[in-house]
Image (cartoon, rainbow, N blue to C red):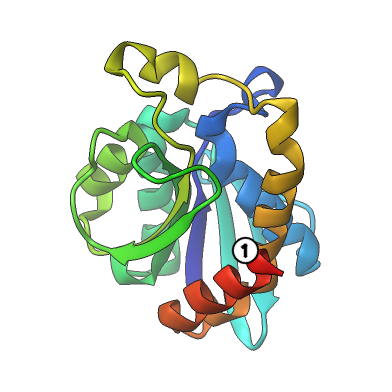
């Protein structure tokens, strides 16, 4: 069993913010892999399904980004899972838009959701970093991160999220290299 977490802020006004791409990824994964509707649990929304033969608990914390770790900690404790069983999908300012990188461990790099996760569960979890690009100057970061995707970004975003969901079985199997490789190939074609 694995716990996959999509980071974002709850509520319709945040739905299309770049900061909510983790929520978006979780939603598309759930849709593509026929997860049942979410239930309110662990201060968030939980879906319990399978990707391939692996049971995946898909959690969208409802605590707002800065407190995401509380929701994740509650789920880990309930299911008796470790941080190593967690995969988190989130926006990455320091990656080009629509690029994806997988890593395990490390610091928060200024991301408050990741900072909260580290505070509550430690840093030994897998991260699916979804690039949103840097706006160029630090004074523009907040507006960029908390801004909606532009219309011109919607089709590439849908393609990216669909590709992440389509290749998610490699993540479930623990093959991060194959996930990244097949994701890149899918997005080229």
* Along the viewing direction, whichever of 55 and 13 lies nearer the viewer: 13
Residue located 20% across and 55% down the image: 122
Residue located 78% across and 65% down the image: 32
Name the spot of residue 44 as percent of width and height, x first: 56, 41
Residue located 37% across and 70% down the image: 81
**Is the C terminus in the top left, top right, bottom left or bottom right quadrant?**
bottom right
Residue 49 showing in the rendered view = no
Q: Is residue 159 left or right of residue 119?
A: right
Name the spot of residue 153 as percent of width and height, x first: 68, 36
Name the spot of residue 42 as percent of width and height, x first: 51, 45
Element at badge 1?
helix
Q: Is residue 139 left or right of residue 11?
A: left
**What is the count of numbered marks?**
1
Q: Quadrant of the rendered structure where residue 105 is?
A: bottom left
**How many residues crowd around disc 1 within 10 Å: few (fewer than 14), some, or many (20 or more)?**
many
Residue 48 showing in the rendered view = yes
Residue located 49% across and 72% down the image: 180
Residue matched to label 1: 164
Residue 110, placed above or below residue 140: below
* Along the viewing direction, whichever of 10 and 143 lies nearer the viewer: 143
Q: Quadrant of the rendered structure where residue 51 is?
A: bottom right
* Along the viewing direction, whichever of 1 and 148 lies nearer the viewer: 148
Name the spot of residue 146 as percent of width and height, x first: 50, 20
């Amino acid at each position: 069993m694995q716990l996959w977490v999509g980071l974002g802020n709850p509520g319709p006004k945040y739905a299309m913010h770049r900061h909510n791409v983790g929520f978006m990824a979780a939603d598309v994964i759930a849709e593509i892999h026929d997860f049942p509707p979410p239930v309110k649990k662990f201060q968030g929304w939980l879906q319990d399904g399978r990707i391939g033969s692996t049971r995946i608990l898909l959690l969208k914390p409802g605590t707002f980004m800065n407190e995401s770790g509380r929701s994740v900690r509650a789920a880990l404790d309930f299911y008796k899972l470790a941080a190593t069983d967690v995969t988190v999908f989130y926006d990455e300012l320091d990656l080009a838009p629509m690029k994806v990188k997988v890593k395990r461990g490390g610091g928060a790099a200024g991301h408050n959701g990741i900072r909260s996760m580290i505070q509550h569960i430690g840093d030994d979890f897998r991260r699916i970093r979804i690039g949103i690009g840097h706006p160029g100057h630090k004074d523009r970061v907040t507006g960029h991160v908390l801004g909606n995707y532009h219309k011109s970004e919607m089709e590439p975003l849908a393609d990216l999220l669909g590709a992440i969901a389509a290749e998610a079985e490699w993540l479930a199997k623990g093959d991060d290299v194959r996930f990244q490789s097949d994701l890149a190939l899918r997005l080229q074609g």
